[in-house]
Image: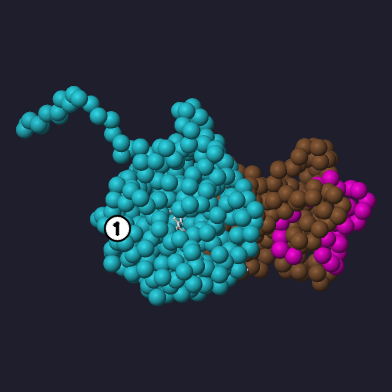
Amino acid sequence: MNRLQVDFLGVPLNTPLVLASGIWGTTASLLERAARAGCGAVTAKSCGPVPRAGHVNPSCLDWGHGLINAIGLANPGVEAEAAMLAQARQTLAELGVPLIASIFAGSPSEFGAVAESIASSRPAFVEVNVSCPNVASEFGEPFAASPQAAAEVTAAVKAVLAPKGIPVIVKLAPNVPSIARIAHAVVEAGADALCAINTMPGMVIDAESGQPILANRSGGLSGPALKPIALKCVYDLHKACPDTPIIGVGGVTTGIDAIEMIMAGATAVGVGSAIYYRGHDAITQIVAEMDAWAEAHRIANVSTLRGAAHHEPHYDASPTGAPIPAAH
Amino acid sequence: MIRIPKTLPAAAPITAIRQDNYRTKTFTFDARLDATPGQFVMAWLPRFDEKPFSLVSADPVALMISAVGPATRLMHELAVGDKLWLRGPFGHGFDAPADQRRIALVAGGYGVAPLLWLARHELGRRDEITVILGARSVQELLYADDLRALASERAGSTAVRLALATEDGSAGRRGLVTDVLQPLLDAGEVDGIYACGPHGMLVALEGLSRRYAIPGQLSWEAYMRCGVGICGACEHDGAVLCLDGPVLSVTP
Ligand SMILES: Cc1cc2nc3c(=O)[nH]c(=O)nc-3n(C[C@H](O)[C@H](O)[C@H](O)COP(=O)(O)OP(=O)(O)OC[C@H]3O[C@@H](n4cnc5c(N)ncnc54)[C@H](O)[C@@H]3O)c2cc1C
Ligand SMILES: Cc1cc2nc3c(=O)[nH]c(=O)nc-3n(C[C@H](O)[C@H](O)[C@H](O)COP(=O)(O)O)c2cc1C
Ligand code: FES
């Protein structure tokens, strides 16, 4: 077994890296490209019940410390998506890289119907996107904002996919008071794994015109600025649900970022915006850096690092406490 | 003069507007950036839309904009002193190997925008540059005068030839740009093909490049969303055009 191979819900991944949903996952050839670059699994772009044009431009911007996007879930609809994924799955199978389909919908029953259709392409996993921040005008508050709503969607998808033997991953949002509460609810409702996090809502305004720049006005932050938020969410999730595998995603740009995500509690690590920051070789570089780090630290397998941040060293001494501030 | 960033769009004042044909204008801006021919910028009209345009020059920034739809029609209403918001450059441009002494630049419609710059850029670096400029009719032709001026300039050792082709024969030869290129390929007079234009033209040139085993670099178009190579909207043959392209080398 190589240093980077990990087990995700009983499926071996050649590396812990997972292509994040919405990055490159629009065509079979791009999914294959990510697999060849070194992803252990690849996630397709989220698809919904019917074709969606998405938002006009600007729909993605580099604001200086990360990206902000409001693509608006542009997708060809589940029927066309299933045909594309069926084709992609075959090439991916030859490469030994499992395919994760990603779905969204407007209600629990619609989620069930989309899950039913996408299952025909026989993906290894289905990721349930209850956390896109960019379609609020049509779909309202994301389901990921409420434990009950997230659980209802999970249960509806689980009911369809369990008989087919397809595990369910639920993708969570960072902007909730307690991500652990949402996680408990969806795991109870049948989620086999969690993916965290989706983008963080934000806005950029152009001073010259006085206007929001994104056509959707607001969007979701990704890339470097997201990393500390993602680490905290994954840390909280691993603490709340230690037996549930997590795909940790958000701001991972280097191999060491990926190692940190595993230390927070992730089993696998999603990459997205890194392709912007490091070019189309990003995945290959991150894999090489993880491997080099593991070798230098004599780590036989990176899964031994999972949750390391939760195992704090014990000292018999205690530090001098910080002083109480004096009133000036 | 402002410097155009790749990050958030910068308001670039228009310093000159030239009418090129009945629906096309070239806008020059009080702005500059570092780029190579074939790269593009995104141009934003606040609260309306943002669209990709090839650079005609980088210092100062100039864009050739054909009014073909809502955004480009609104851009045509802008006057000198007004602003258009720009960010870039994006993508990879043309990159001609030094050993190609005789190159052909093939332009269809507004595809001439990056090729005029490429022709200027290659002056003095080649023995011969043949520009083949095509359009449906004489009214659609773009940059013919600029290219004629370039052909008469004779910079250094480079000879510039210009050939026009229109589908209705109203200017130059009647026919397609490929009808002009093919005899040159038969005669062994071309070492490299550089092109930008409509999809059908590029597909035909891709075929010729392969058939004659002459290296080709073609600038393709696709609807762009993120513009930075991550969303996958602009996929073409396994490449993302906004990052790997828009100029792609023809694979043998
Ligand atoms: C890399 C690149 C370089 C370009 N360079 C130039 C140029 O130098 N000069 C020029 O006049 N035009 C150029 N274009 C095309 C230009 O972007 C479109 O003409 C413009 O987007 C039309 O917008 P609209 O709202 O006016 O019309 P629409 O009604 O939106 O479209 C009219 C036509 O333009 C195409 N189009 C629309 N949006 C895009 C988009 N985001 N990307 C690609 N094609 C689109 C449509 O398929 C349609 O055929 C370029 C396109 C690309 C991708
Ligand atoms: C352009 C873009 C499109 C995205 N589309 C989706 C999507 O369709 N479904 C989804 O679940 N997440 C989507 N995301 C979120 C990513 O999957 C990921 O959660 C987020 O970008 C954080 O990771 P990163 O910092 O590595 O990019 C998108 C992100 C970006 C930047
Ligand atoms: S527009 Fe090219 S990948 Fe997004």
Residue occupying image coordinates x 33% and y 54%? A174
State the image coordinates of residue A71 (x, y, percent, origin top left).
47, 61
State the image coordinates of residue A81 (x, y, percent, origin top left).
56, 67
Residue occupying image coordinates x 72% and y 67%? B140
Q: Which residue is mark 1?
A: A184
Q: Quadrant of ligand 2?
A: bottom left
Residue occupying image coordinates x 74% and y 57%? B107
Instruction: Choose between A112 and A198: the one closer to the eye.
Output: A112
**Is B227 above or below relative to A38?**
below
**Is A314 above or below relative to B95?**
above
Identity of the amino acid at label 1?
His
Disc 1 secondary structure class: helix
Point out the stretch of residues depicted in magenta.
B173-200
**Is B197 above or below relative to A326?**
below
For the rendered model, the colour scheme is by chain
Queried whether the magenta region covers residue B104, the answer comes back as no
Specify the quadrant that holds the N terminus of chain A: top right
**Is A316 above or below relative to B112?**
above
Instruction: Choose between A171 and B112: the one closer to the eye.
Output: A171
Image colour assigned to chain A = cyan
Is there any visible trace of residue B3 in the rendered image?
no
Image colour assigned to chain B = brown
Specify the quadrant that holds the C terminus of chain A: top left
